[in-house]
Amino acid sequence: MIEVKNIRKGFGEKTVLNGVTVTMQPGKCNLIIGASGSGKTVFMKCMVGLLVPDQGEICYDDKDFNKLGAEEKKEIRQQIGMLFQGSALFDSLTVEQNIMFPLNMFTQDTYAQKLKRVNGVLERVNLKDVNKKYPAELSGGMKKRVGIARAIVLNPKYLFVDEPNSGLDPQTSLVIDKLVKEITTEYNITTVVNTHDMNSVMEIGDHIIFMYQGKKEWEGSNKEIIFNKNERLNEFIFASEFLKDAKDMRMLEQTGKISNDRDMDKLLPPG
Amino acid sequence: MTLFTEFGRYLLMIKGMFSKPENWKMYWKELMHQCNEIGIGSLGIVVIISFFMGAVSALQTAYQLVSPVIPMSTVAQIVRDTVILEFAPTLVCIVLAGVVGSKIASELGNMRVSEQIDALEIMGINTKAYLVLPKILASLIMIPLLVVISAALGILGGQLAATSAGILSANQYETGLLSNFQQYNVFFALVKAYTFSFLISSIPAYYGYHVQGGALEIGRSSTKSVVVSCVSILFADYVLAALLLQ
């Protein structure tokens, strides 16, 4: 379980995170949402240990990550997989070598065993015949899928995903979202996703944390978010014209001033 | 950022390189890869520079030796000592600071900007040990070898230039090469080669590893690393000469 207790982080005089406390739900998709500059990325970097918070605790199974020794930190990091915004694949390695890299570094398996594992995760992310291709030869969506494959190849306990849909078309975004959700369920991983894509929120958000100016502003599920009463969150989620329409429908429905001839259920997440 | 802060971060990077490797085989593979990149990758330019450096040195020395009292074999002696003491270690290392240094800085800078270093960190790999240390070790192994090759080729270039221009015969050149040869000069050249190898690899690694920003910053850090490396080489050259050539 990941617990974040009252973390603060600043750069110079600017405070980016201001006392955030959150518990990530194990085995679920935890989404951190918020506008650009709200502190999402810094928050995620603090959680994975790329940045050290000025104050507060990041606990993995009750162990404060920042108080651990180098070897203990390494052990926890080996339980973490991460998909970066730009995929962060190693340019000079093929897809197969990229995915095999963590296996080469941390296992004593034979080449045949490692190859079997690589092909297994590639199949899981629906990629075929790309083993010998270089990252430069792949599309954005394929790179993300290779990134996911590399992140899950060591069967991590925690999966961090930074802006999975940036630079992708809506259809590919949907595929990536579904993949993240399916992998979370299948592998029973605690997934933390950093996004500002409302489609992702509604598709995969089991537990949503809304950040505003470095603070946790709201927390809930994708079923609760659409009927939330937080003004800042509503401003964020109903920023698009389409969703404004949905908001109007919801308000009219709630006040009962006019009859609603559109089906609200279609706007709600499945289930 | 002040000079002292930068120097402190540089020292911390060096300190951070020393940890138990996660997998010795992978580190060995990376070391061999870097030896190939740094050593074999720079061999061509070193061969060309060294040969012409020796040739020009022979011709210019002969041009200045106008006294009938001094035997022409002295040309070979001067070429030998100049090449061993200064040209092979210093000039070649300054060229390598550009070739190898910019490569190291831009490679690490690109990895930093595209989050590849972060990806390695999250996997639980000590990136300073896995990315920086093999580059420094490979430089310490390969650059002194290149300096030795450079010295030999410089002397050979001098011989070819001097004999083909009719300044002195091959026999006279060999006589000059063997007279008053001091082995200490070779030791001094190797001390310089090892010192410069460390500077050429660690300074660009520092600038590349700590890049912040995008493509523009990678270019800037690469240029800065070459400039700082060259100045450091010249400064170290002076210090070593003052300390070891008394």
Image (cartoon, coloured by chain):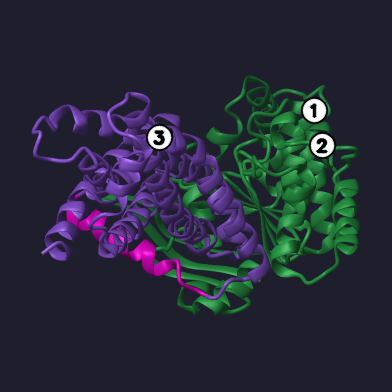
Chain colours: A green, B purple
Q: Nearer the viewer, residue A270 or A227?
A: A270
Residue B131: image tag: none
Marks 1 and 2: in contact by CB < 8 Å? yes
Dot 1 lies on which element?
helix
- At 69% from the left and 31% from the top, the residue drawn is A136
Q: Which mark is residue B51?
A: 3
- The verdict on residue A107 being magenta is no
Residues shaded magenta = B2-19
Q: Please tell me whether mark 2 sits on a helix, a strand or a loop.
A: helix
Camera sees residue A173: no
Task: Give whichever of B73, A7 is nearer the camera.
Answer: B73
Q: Which residue is mark 1?
A: A171
Subunit of mark 2?
Answer: A
Mark 3 residue element = helix
Q: Which residue is mark 2?
A: A175
* Res B16 → quadrant: bottom left
The kind of residue on which mark 3 rests is Phe
- Label 1 is placed on what type of residue? Gln
- The residue at the point 50 percent across, 57 percent down is B138
Q: Is residue B162 left or right of residue A207?
A: left
Q: On the rendered structure, is B68 left or right of B98?
A: left
